[in-house]
Image: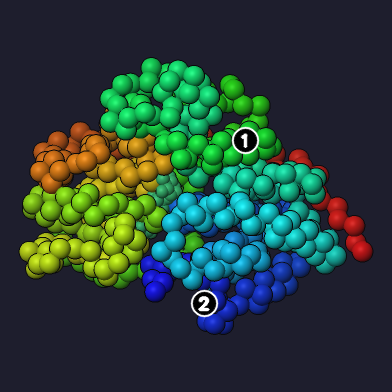
Amino acid sequence: MGRKNPDTQRVSPNEIKSTGVKLEDSTKISMEGEKQQSKLGRRLLLFSAPFTGHMNPMLNLATILYSKGFSITIIQAPYFPTNPAHYPHFTFKLLDDEVLEKYSKSPEIDSSVVISAMNRTCEEPFRDCLGQILRETAVAEQDPVVALIADPMWAFSGSVAASFNLPKIMLRTGNMSAFLVYCSLTLLNEKGYFPPQDTTLEEKIPEFPPLKVKDLPSESDRHILQAIVEGTTTSQGVICNTFEELEDYAIAKLQQTLTIPIFPLGPLHKHPANSVVNIGSQDQTSIAWLNTQAPKSVLYVSFGSIAGMNKDEFLELMWGLLDSMVPFLLVIRPKLVKGSEADDPLPEGYREMMGERGHIVKWASQLEVLSHPAVGGFLTHNGWNSTLESICEGVPMVCKPLFADQNMNARHVSENWKIGLKMERGVKRDEVTRAIRKLMLEEGAEMRSRITDLKEKATHCLEEGGSSYKSLERLTKYLLSFETFQAIKE
Ligand code: UDX
């Protein structure tokens, strides 16, 4: 039995059809609405990977570029697409791909299976879709298309765009420190660091402080990481959801080695254009519960939208959390515990022991939660969006990374920016308790002061004259320098 997707911004292709928010209708409405030319008279095509941690930043970027005067077309894969009703000012196009549409009916399918299907089956549907958009916009004399902005997880997007002579810019949704590592996999391999032979290796990597060998991605990620690097470095530019004050070293280093321009525009969700996007509150109960708690007393616990952990690890975390005696708001979404078919993976009696001290939901409005005055800490898997969102609200972290870039992100949080405590693999319940109490009750003040400093920098960089503000001006000029696509009007 497929379980319902807890992220209410996203729907199955069928749900879109059956709820009357038909993609075709919303496409038509937007297209007609945009017949009058946009301020800049230029259209951008945006193509996101179909995962929450990738779609959120892409939609935030779309809103920012729309506010600068571009028309926006969002191309979506039929795997839990974003509900177009939330973005009536964009045009939406859905790829015609049976494999991903089928996976949308089985949410328990692993993300790695979805990623390999994306690149195996979507190239031709994407080519058809791109060709159709280019013809339609030309025939209807709508704003001409100037560029494709794609997620580098789509390995074929560059070659398809090139076949239409369309410039391609990449949106890197993760951070640039991790991207620098991905660009250096050959070097790391020659030096014997990658792939890590032993996931407990404490050895430091001198070229990439403060990373340790055990933080590096695993061999199974090599193929997709190489595709991401290849796709990005052969594009006409890369936009990233970070800011210079946070990642100056990695950005400068990449700028020296890459021949393409880099546009750090982050934090994208904090750009003023995104404050008006109303996607509706997804979980009223969390905020109501937080309203009853003392300032900075609550630990928010969430592990993003796709990462899973094994049952033993989950139980140690849950018992450690309970033993800490700290109030907590806990997100347990479907698929969080690998192999668990139970609706509630918590041990019997847990909820009774927790009582009023905790509140458990399947999905939270994370941005609202992190900005709530009662929240004093975040136990996170350190997906890049969660990490950046925590920084933007000045909430220090207990880090429990699970896979992909998360170990590297957690290392930067704990040892570079010193705004969190990292728990290592195989953590036991008493260590979990200790880390939580240390952050929430003992040594949190210093970390809070450092993260408040970063929060201020994250705010200033978006203001007039700030680093991300200037990057956006530079990007806008760059996009306007591309020639508009001239389709043959047959
Ligand atoms: C994935 C990868 O796991 C991560 O390593 C990579 O950096 C980005 O892509 P994900 O695991 O979903 O992302 O984590 P994250 O990057 O933190 O993104 C999750 C998003 O979902 C955040 O924007 C967060 O605000 C949102 N979220 C999560 C909610 O709104 N509610 C929740 O309950 C949980």
Q: Residue at x 68, y 54 (%)?
A: 123
Q: Position of residue 355 (x, y in %)?
A: 9, 66
| Total residue callouts | 2
User: In the rendered view, how is the structure colored?
Assistant: rainbow
Residue where numbered disc 2 is placed = 15
Vertically, is 357 above or below 471? Answer: below
Tell whether 203 sits left or right of 68.
left
Crowd around label 1: few <14 · some 14–19 · many ≥20 (10 Å):
some
The three-letter code of the residue at mark 1 reads Glu
Q: Nearer the viewer, mark 2 or mark 1?
A: 1
Please report whichever mark, 2 or 1, sits nearer to the chain's N-terminal start: 2
Q: CA distance from mark 2 to mark 1?
A: 36 Å
Say which quadrant the C terminus sits in: bottom right
Near-viewer residue (105 or 486):
105
Mark 1 secondary-structure assignment: helix
Does dot 2 land on a helix, a strand or a loop?
helix
Residue labelled with disc 1: 230
Q: Please tell me which residue is depicted at 44% across the width and 27% down the height of the picture.
A: 194
Q: Is residue 368 visible?
A: no
Q: Amino acid at mark 2?
A: Glu
